[in-house]
Amino acid sequence: MALFAPLVHLAERELGARRDFTSVPASYWWAVISMTTVGYGDMVPRSVPGQVVALSSILSGILLMAFPVTSIFHTFSRSYSELKEQQQRAASPEPALREDSTRSASASATEASSQDPEGSGETGDSADLAWARTGPA
């Protein structure tokens, strides 16, 4: 913007088209609007050199402002999904702890069934432990 505003002001002033670009600050308004690809159309360069400056300004606005936004968004999106995965891993219990607790629970169930006086092989406690290991059907 600091480059194209004075250039378009100079190009338009030299060729006598002083109608829109009356000052450098007014040219900055045009540069901001044109480089952000909004382009209200309230200020338009009328001379060929002014239009060349305008084309350069608009293309550089797209290349320097619009394209990097997609890259920044992609990087943010990837970082956000990695953060969510880390939070989910931190919120869930460790898999190694689950295996150890499952092994100790099955060992307790085996001991309880071996001490069953009726010899049925499975008590209510061991059935509950088996359900806890496999989950609901």
Image: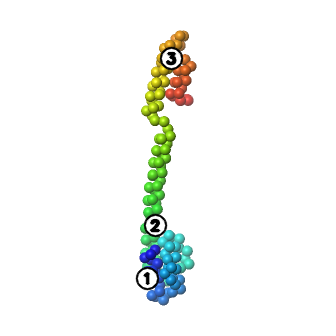
Q: Viewer-proximal residue, 12 or 24?
A: 24
Numbered tag placed on residue 65 in the rendering: 2
Q: Residue at x 50, y 87 (%)?
A: 17
Note whether 66 is above or below 43 in the view shown: above
Instruction: Inspect the image, locate mark 3, and give the three-letter code of the amino acid beneath it.
Output: Ala
Callout 2: few (<14), some (14-19), or many (20+) C-alpha neighbours within 10 Å? some
Image location of residue 131, percent across then percent down: 54, 26
Residue at the spot 47% in from the left edge and 53% down from the top edge:
77
95 on left or right of 43? left
State yes or no: discs 3 and 2 in contact (Cβ < 8 Å). no
Could you give the CA–CA distance between mark 2 and mark 1, rounded to whole angstroms? 23 Å
Q: Secondary structure at mark 2?
A: helix
Q: Which residue corresponds to mark 1?
A: 49
Element marked by disc 3? helix
Q: Name the residue that disc number 3 marks.
A: 112
- Measured in 3D between alpha carbons, the distance from the residue under mark 3 to the one under mark 2, in whole angstroms, is 70 Å
Earlier sequence position, callout 3 versus callout 2: 2
Q: Position of residue 106 (x, y in %)?
A: 47, 23
The amino acid at mark 2 is Met
Residue at 47% x, 31% y is 98
Camera-near label (1 vs 3) is 3
Mark 2 vs mark 1, foreground winner is: 2
Give the vertical position of 11 relative to 121 (above or below): below
| Residue 33 image label | none
Tell us which disc is closer to us: 3 or 2.
Answer: 3
Label 3 environment density (alpha carbons within 10 Å; few <14, some 14–19, many ≥20)? some
How far apart are the alpha carbons under marks 1 and 3?
93 Å
Q: Position of residue 15 (x, y in %)?
A: 46, 88
